Image (tube, rainbow, N blue to C red):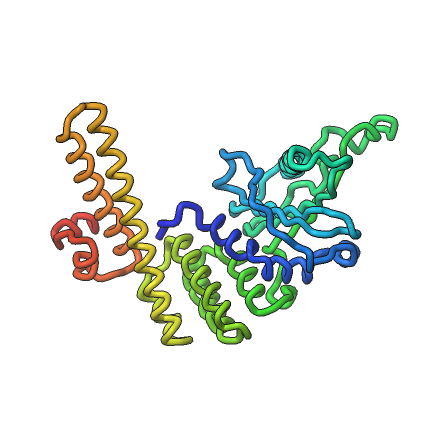
């Protein structure tokens, strides 16, 4: 099921973008010597993103203003969506940090640049093998004399490679643990193994102290999983959720229905846009109507494919989409 444009980006920003969740993560995972200098009570999320447009399918970022050693500073998260590590992240991060500094210079023209602590969150299954230092990607750096290296920019970023953490090594409140385990395990290929992981995650939700916030993040998690995993059958996921809590099972089905409707609405919008474009190009009302009709039919077919892929019975797919059973059988062949 793939109805959200970029589910990894959406999940990261809805979880780590929550100030309480970000504060909890930083409190538990920042190196102690840095944590001692950071006043997490002053943390403020910033609106802008600094990632190149062509890389937004693979990366997300979040910037937080915070007091560091009693001065204004920033904590910058770069989240890699891919299941394998990228090379040259140190250079990429440096470019984004320069953009942050440039934006701050434009805003207030400070005498000096604010401190930025860069962090990378990676949740792929392959081990991270990119250098944490800028010097690590500069050719022959280690053999260069100090007389040369003193003129070369150098810094190091903090890496959180979630694939290296066991359940026992992960720390924090229950909601944070659920989020981190979900991010770590989302790429696991074994469907049945993921079913077991999901069951454990849903049980963990029952232990969350703030159940109102827990339900909010439960919906976020289910949307993420249903939009990311192509191998899951909706009815099986419903059964898993219902085993833990009937209420969560019903909420999960409601979320799935919303995702399907969102997919239909996006398809209809695309159909309208294509129809209007065709109508303008041909100067004919007929072109507009043909485009709209084509968009509607393509949307119905796409939704039907998604539902069939989730294991929904043919008569229910027909009822949800308005397609005939004969049309649905053709999709199944």
The furthest residue to the front: 108
Q: Return the x and y of residue 293 as percentages of the image width and height.
A: 17, 40
Q: Is residue 88 visible?
A: no
Count of number-bearing discs = 0
Q: Return the x and y of residue 46 as percentages of the image width and height.
A: 59, 47
Whether residue 229 is situated above or below residue 287 in the rendered picture: below
Residue under the point 51% across and 45% down: 82
Q: Is residue 239 left or right of residue 217?
A: left
Q: Return the x and y of residue 9 as percentages of the image width and height.
A: 49, 48
Residue under the point 14% across and 49% down: 327
Whether residue 202 is situated above or below residue 62 in the rendered picture: below
In this view, the residue in front, 177 or 88, is 177
Q: Is residue 272 left or right of residue 56?
A: left
Q: Is residue 178 left or right of residue 40?
A: left
Residue under the point 65% across and 36% down: 107
In this view, the residue in front, 178 or 167, is 178
Q: Return the x and y of residue 89 as percentages of the image width and height.
A: 63, 39
Q: Is residue 277 visible?
A: yes
In this view, the residue in front, 84 or 93, is 93
Whether residue 86 is situated above or below residue 242 in the rendered picture: above
In which image quadrant can residue 318 be found?
Answer: bottom left
């Amino acid at each position: 099921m793939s109805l959200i444009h970029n589910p990894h980006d959406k999940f990261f920003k809805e979880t780590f973008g929550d100030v309480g969740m970000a504060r909890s993560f930083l409190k538990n995972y920042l190196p102690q010597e840095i944590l001692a200098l950071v006043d997490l009570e002053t943390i403020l999320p910033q609106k802008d993103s600094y990632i190149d447009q062509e890389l937004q399918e693979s990366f997300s970022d979040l910037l937080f203003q915070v007091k560091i050693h009693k001065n204004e500073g920033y904590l910058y998260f770069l989240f890699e969506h891919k299941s394998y590590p990228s090379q040259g992240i140190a250079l990429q991060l440096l470019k984004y940090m320069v953009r942050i500094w440039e934006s701050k210079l434009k805003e207030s023209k400070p005498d000096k640049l604010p401190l930025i602590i860069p962090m990378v969150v990676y949740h792929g299954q392959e081990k991270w093998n990119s250098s944490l230092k800028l010097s690590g990607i500069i050719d022959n750096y280690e053999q260069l004399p100090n007389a040369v290296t003193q003129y070369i920019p150098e810094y190091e970023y903090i890496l959180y490679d979630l694939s290296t953490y066991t359940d026992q090594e992960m720390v924090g409140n229950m909601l944070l643990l659920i989020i981190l385990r979900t991010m770590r395990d989302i790429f696991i290929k074994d469907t049945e193994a993921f079913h077991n992981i999901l069951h454990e995650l849903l049980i963990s939700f029952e232990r969350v102290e703030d159940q109102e916030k827990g339900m909010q993040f439960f919906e976020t998690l289910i949307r993420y999983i249903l939009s990311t995993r192509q191998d899951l059958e909706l009815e099986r996921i419903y059964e898993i959720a219902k085993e833990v809590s009937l209420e969560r099972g019903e909420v999960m089905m409601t979320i799935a229905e919303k995702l399907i409707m969102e997919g239909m609405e996006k398809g209809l919008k695309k159909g309208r846009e294509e129809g209007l474009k065709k109508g303008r190009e041909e100067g004919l009302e007929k072109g507009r109507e043909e485009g709209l009709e084509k968009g509607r039919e393509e949307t119905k077919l796409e939704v039907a494919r998604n539902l069939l892929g989730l294991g929904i019975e043919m008569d229910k797919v027909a009822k949800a989409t308005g397609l005939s059973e004969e049309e649905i059988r053709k999709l199944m062949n």
